[in-house]
């Protein structure tokens, strides 16, 4: 769930959504908040979804892969099953940040399950929320927009009565020594859990991963330098600081030269300071035409 890489573009096959299919999009659970110069909301219609898919294309294809799709959109077969959280700049109407949210209220086919065997997580009691496809426009990466997105996530979490949140947290490396040291650091800090028997699927398995006795905190000037260099993405660290756990070993994505850690957060264990930060008297579950505006 790295801000820039947490949600990787899937290789688009012929089964990917057509423009006609996208026009059938309808929101599942409306959320609407206002914060001074910004609006936080779920996409209401095809046109808003299309803008979010264009932002994803600009970030994941053009910026990260230096490629361009003919459609100018980054989309996959999961998009119609999901809600799409947006941050809009009021003055321009531009979508400057987005997160894809999929609740077990609406579907039980998960993107994360394409990489991991995660049956025990799928069978956990209560509603679950998968987070993915997070990105922020390059001109607005000050930390504010991701905070606004998290306010929206908190509102959506309340509306859907979510008990667990999960998703793939990507780390941009395929170097086994680096992966081993990052894994050792996470384990040393008690961020790794094997409770749910999560493991990568066949082609995503890391073969012969060395076990390091030298975690990131002891290497290269310490963990802060690793975060600055993007080895341990700040967004992953924010999940962990909020009480999330990394479930088992990471999955290797050779196409995008990264590893994905399945990250799970039990909502009841959300750290108090994060819960207080993102709690608000929101319009969760209400019609966006009659919102309770949050003005700070």
Image (cartoon, rainbow, N blue to C red):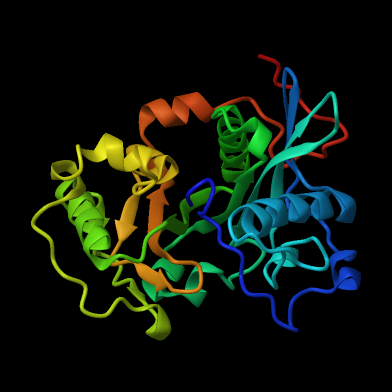
Left or right placement of residue 291 versus residue 189 in this view = right
Left or right placement of residue 62 versus residue 126 in this view = right
Q: Is residue 138 above or below residue 216?
A: above
Q: In the image, what residue occupies the spot 72% across and 62% down?
A: 74
Q: State the residue lying farthest toward the left.
A: 213
Decide if residue 296 is in sight here.
Answer: yes
Q: Is residue 33 above or below residue 5?
A: above
Number of numbered callouts drawn: 0
Q: Quadrant of the C terminus?
A: top right
Q: Give how far across and how far down residue 265 sits, in percent.
A: 40, 50
Q: Is residue 42 above or below residue 151?
A: below
Left or right placement of residue 184 versus residue 230 in this view = left
Q: Nearer the viewer, residue 103 or 72?
A: 72
Q: In the image, what residue occupies the spot 88% across and 69% down?
A: 19
Q: State the residue lying farthest toward the front.
A: 66
Q: Give how far across and how far down residue 219 sits, in percent.
A: 16, 45
Q: Give how far across and how far down residue 221 sits, in percent.
A: 19, 37
Q: In the image, what residue occupies the spot 17% across and 42% down?
A: 217
């Amino acid at each position: 769930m790295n801000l820039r890489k947490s949600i990787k573009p899937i290789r688009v096959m012929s089964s990917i959504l057509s423009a006609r299919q996208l026009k059938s999009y309808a929101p599942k659970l409306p959320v609407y908040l206002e914060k001074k110069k910004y609006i936080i909301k779920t996409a209401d219609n095809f046109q808003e979804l299309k803008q979010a898919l264009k932002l994803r294309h600009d970030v994941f294809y053009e910026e990260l892969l230096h490629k361009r799709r003919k459609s100018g959109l980054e989309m996959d077969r999961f998009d119609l099953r999901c809600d799409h959280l947006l941050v809009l700049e009021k003055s321009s109407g531009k979508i400057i940040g987005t997160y894809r949210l999929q609740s077990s209220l609406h579907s039980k086919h998960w993107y994360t399950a394409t990489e991991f065997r995660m049956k025990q997580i799928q069978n956990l009691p209560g509603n679950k929320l998968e987070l993915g496809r997070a990105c922020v426009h390059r001109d607005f990466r000050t930390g504010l927009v991701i905070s606004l997105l998290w306010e929206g996530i908190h509102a959506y979490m309340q509306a859907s009565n979510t008990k667990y949140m999960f998703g793939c947290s990507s780390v941009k490396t395929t170097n086994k020594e680096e992966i081993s040291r990052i894994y050792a650091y996470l384990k040393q800090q008690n961020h790794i859990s094997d409770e749910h028997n999560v493991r990568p699927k066949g082609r995503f398995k890391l073969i012969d991963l060395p076990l390091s006795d030298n975690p990131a905190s002891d290497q290269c000037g310490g963990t802060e330098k690793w975060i600055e260099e993007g080895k341990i993405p700040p967004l992953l660290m924010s999940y962990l600081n909020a009480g999330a756990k990394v479930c088992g070993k990471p999955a290797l994505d050779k196409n995008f030269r990264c590893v994905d850690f399945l990250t799970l957060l039990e909502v009841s264990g959300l750290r108090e300071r994060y819960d207080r930060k993102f709690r608000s008297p929101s319009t969760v579950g209400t019609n966006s035409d009659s919102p309770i505006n949050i003005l700070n």
